[in-house]
């Protein structure tokens, strides 16, 4: 055979109508899904087919002929709001699969829609997707609910469990929690009727399995349960998930203030931990409303260490405290085993020395910092700084027990080892997460305003010995709460209660502080933040005493938001040294620290002295903080007792008032 000739085109432009009908039909389908990719654009049914279908079929006679013969164009989101349109669409997709998309609101409000729905149900065996949406929250006060929609959904579940649907790949059900979760479902056995099912999303569905029959087919890829229940004991959960080894996405999320059902708080006596093998899983979320419920789910599932991981607990301290009081022994058992299970889960990453270079600390969790503007901190790395995404996920959230502000404050003065204490149990879960090398080796910590500093935070933070950067997302968080932490660290160090406290962040070189929002960028009315100058002086002296040998920069972002910012900055310049204080009038909180090491100043200073540099200048450079204080005898204040190292407020103010702020402030 002669070789195939390369494609050639005629000199004149070809028209789209010159395409064969089957190619033109494919173009129409692509256009449809480009403009209308959701099965249901809202919780209300469309009156007719999607708008792109109507538009395409009215361009020309040829296009209309091709569009009418293309069955897939007319198979989207049936039934329509119009009975006539529903009949027409069923006629034009008489042999093709279709998408059943049911509006629970329209079932209540429209008799015509109910008739259209009944018209479609006999064709259920041809459905390639099933969606049922009953969302009253999107239309508050506009729809009065009754049992009609809930009964229709129960009947639909029964049909799904008795009708063979070989082409069905998607099942999405949203039942509004305004009318509580849907219970008393007679049957939900999708494994025997929807064998091709790959995606299941259930919201507000409560099902009590019977007889040990599998619920989901073995080929299931995604399972999302929101305020829903398909198992009631740990053993039932293990049996259900054990039948879906191909699962790639699994999320179980519960809001405890709207959903009251729970898995029995009892460990399995039959199965061992990590017994459910989900080797293809790429995402795991266990946010089941409490520490007990979330950790029960995590303890029995084994999946790859590089899968996205979210383990979250209750958002309210009262709920968490109630669970701890009700089941103290189980809480103790879960905490005791969680450390070993977490290390077993991350063993491939730990063995290779992988870690997250940046972490975010929030009230609810520890999570990986995902910065779209800064690629260096957005992914796990190996010791040689190469990517480690083959053994660690890009997204990870590890929950923390919630405590009240009062409990956090009291923890500084009372340290009871009480299994019923939320503060004590919070410290134990902090220890579990901080003991993981993938977290403990981090270099950057971002403190969110919601993060709670308590007495146990010192032990937790002292484990991060490689940290070089701290980011504070609010001025009060830095000046008030972090300062309080440092004061207590000094006290406990003196009392020898926390041996690691004196070495808190021994390599710290840069502190970033967000002084306020960028009002111009956000289009907001400017609101200045007042600075407590005496408090700032005490904090600056604390920084000087604790990190004299390593701290190089204190970066103030949006410092113009401080009403007395010029005076505050001059105070910092005077105490820390002007070369260390940097002001940025925009949010660059992800800027990287300088590559210069902390001891570079000492080496440069020594070189200058060897070259016969100015002796007075050399003496000043010898202090790591450029603005170091020297007493009358010329000795550095490193020899002054700590009790005398905090400057009096009047002394610093007198020094500041005689200086020009602009000489000491570097605005980038």
Image: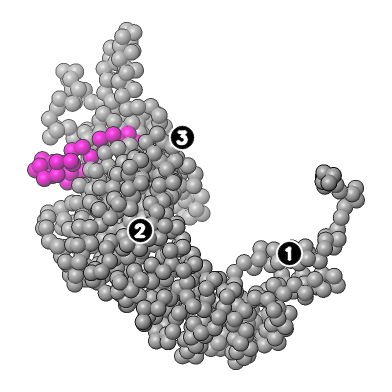
Labels 3 and 2 touching (C-beta < 8 A): no
- SS for tag 3? loop
Q: Which residue is drawn at 52% across and 76% down?
A: 194
Q: Residue furthest top?
A: 612
Q: Residue 281 carries which label?
A: none
Q: Does the magenta stretch include residue 435?
A: no
Residue extent of the magenta highlight: 486-510
Q: What residue did someone put label 1 on?
A: 26
Q: Residue 668 carries which label?
A: 3
Image position of 31 (left or right of 117): right
Q: Distance between the residues labelled 1 and 2?
A: 42 Å
Q: Does the magenta stretch include residue 489?
A: yes
Q: Which of marks 3 and 1 is in front?
A: 1
- In percent of width and height, residue 464 lies at 27, 42
Q: Nearer the viewer, mark 1 or mark 2?
A: 2
- SS for tag 2? strand
Q: Earlier in the sequence, mark 1 or mark 2?
A: 1
Q: Residue 302 carries which label?
A: 2
Residue 416, image quadrant? bottom left
Instruction: Please determine whether, in this image, residue 383 is positioned above or below residue 311.
Output: above
Do we see residue 450 in this rendering? no
Q: Residues within 10 Å of mark 2 (few under 14, many from 20)?
A: some
Q: How crowded is mark 1: few (under 14 residues within 10 Å), some or many (20 or more)?
A: some
Q: Earlier in the sequence, mark 3 or mark 2?
A: 2
Labels 1 and 2 touching (C-beta < 8 A): no
- In percent of width and height, residue 240 lies at 38, 71
What colour scheme has been applied to the protein in the rendered image?
Answer: one colour
Image position of 401 (left or right of 417): right
Q: Which of marks 3 and 1 is nearer the N terminus?
A: 1
Give the number of marks. 3
Q: How far apart are marks 3 and 1 (CA)?
A: 55 Å
Q: Which residue is drawn at 35% across and 58% down?
A: 302
């Amino acid at each position: 055979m002669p070789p195939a000739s390369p494609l050639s085109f005629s000199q004149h432009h070809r028209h789209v109508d010159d395409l064969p009908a089957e190619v033109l039909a494919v173009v129409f389908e692509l256009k449809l899904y480009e403009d209308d990719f959701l099965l249901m654009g809202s919780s209300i049914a469309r009156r007719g087919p999607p708008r792109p279908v109507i538009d395409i079929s009215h361009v020309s006679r040829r296009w209309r002929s091709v569009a009418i013969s293309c069955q897939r164009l007319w198979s989207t989101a049936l039934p329509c709001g119009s009975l006539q349109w529903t009949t027409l669409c069923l006629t034009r997709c008489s042999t093709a699969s279709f998408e059943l998309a049911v509006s629970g609101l329209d079932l209540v409000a429209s008799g015509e829609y109910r008739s259209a729905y009944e018209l479609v149900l006999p064709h259920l065996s041809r459905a390639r997707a099933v969606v049922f949406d009953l969302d009253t929250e999107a239309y508050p006060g506009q729809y009065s609910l009754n049992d009609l929609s809930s009964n229709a959904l129960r009947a639909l579940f029964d049909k799904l469990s008795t009708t063979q649907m070989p082409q069905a790949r998607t099942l999405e059900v949203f039942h509004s929690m305004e009318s509580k979760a849907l219970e008393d479902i007679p049957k939900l056995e999708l494994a025997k009727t929807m064998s091709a099912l790959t995606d299941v999303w259930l919201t507000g569905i409560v099902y009590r399995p019977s007889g040990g029959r599998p619920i989901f087919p073995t080929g299931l890829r995604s399972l999302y349960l929101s305020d829903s229940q398909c198992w009631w004991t740990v053993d039932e959960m293990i049996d259900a998930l054990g039948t879906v080894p191909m699962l790639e996405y699994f999320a179980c999320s519960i809001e405890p203030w709207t959903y009251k059902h729970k898995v029995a708080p009892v460990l399995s006596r039959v199965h061992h931990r990590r017994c459910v093998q989900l080797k293809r899983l790429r995402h795991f979320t266990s946010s089941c409303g409490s520490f007990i419920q979330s950790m029960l789910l995590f303890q029995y599932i084994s999946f790859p260490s590089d899968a996205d991981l979210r383990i979250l607990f209750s958002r309210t301290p009262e709920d968490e405290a109630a669970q701890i009081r009700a089941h103290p022994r189980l809480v103790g058992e879960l905490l005791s085993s969680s450390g070993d299970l977490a290390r077993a889960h991350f063993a491939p990453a730990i063995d290779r020395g992988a870690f997250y270079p940046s972490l975010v600390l929030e009230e609810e969790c520890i999570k990986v910092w995902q910065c779209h503007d800064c690629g260096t901190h957005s992914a796990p790395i190996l010791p040689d700084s190469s990517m480690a995404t083959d053994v660690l996920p890009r997204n990870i959230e590890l929950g923390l027990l919630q405590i009240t502000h009062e409990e956090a404050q009291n923890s500084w003065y009372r340290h009871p080892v009480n299994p019923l204490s939320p503060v004590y149990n919070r410290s134990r879960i902090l220890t579990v997460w901080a003991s993981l090398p993938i977290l403990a080796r981090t270099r950057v910590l971002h403190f969110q305003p919601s993060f709670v500093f308590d007495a146990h935070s010192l032990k937790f933070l002292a484990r991060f010995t490689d940290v070089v950067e701290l980011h504070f997302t609010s001025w009060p968080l830095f000046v008030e709460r972090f300062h309080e932490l440092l004061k207590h660290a000094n006290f406990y160090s003196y009392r020898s209660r926390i041996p690691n406290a004196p070495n808190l962040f021994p390599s710290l070189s840069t502190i970033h502080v967000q002084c306020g929002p960028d009002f111009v960028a956000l289009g907001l009315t400017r609101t200045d933040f007042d600075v407590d100058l005496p408090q700032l002086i005490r904090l600056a002296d604390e920084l000087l005493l604790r990190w004299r040998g390593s701290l190089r920069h204190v970066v103030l972002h949006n410092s113009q938001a401080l009403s007395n910012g010029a005076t505050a900055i001059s105070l910092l310049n005077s105490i820390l040294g002007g070369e260390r204080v940097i002001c940025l009038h925009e949010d660059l909180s992800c800027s990287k620290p300088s590559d210069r090491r902390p001891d570079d100043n000492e080496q440069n200073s020594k070189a200058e002295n060897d070259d016969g540099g100015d002796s007075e200048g050399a003496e000043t450079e010898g202090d790591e903080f450029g603005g170091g204080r020297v007493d009358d005898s010329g000795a550095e204040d490193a020899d002054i007792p700590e009790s005398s190292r905090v400057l009096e407020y009047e002394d610093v103010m007198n020094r500041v008032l005689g200086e020009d702020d602009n000489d000491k402030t570097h605005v980038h």
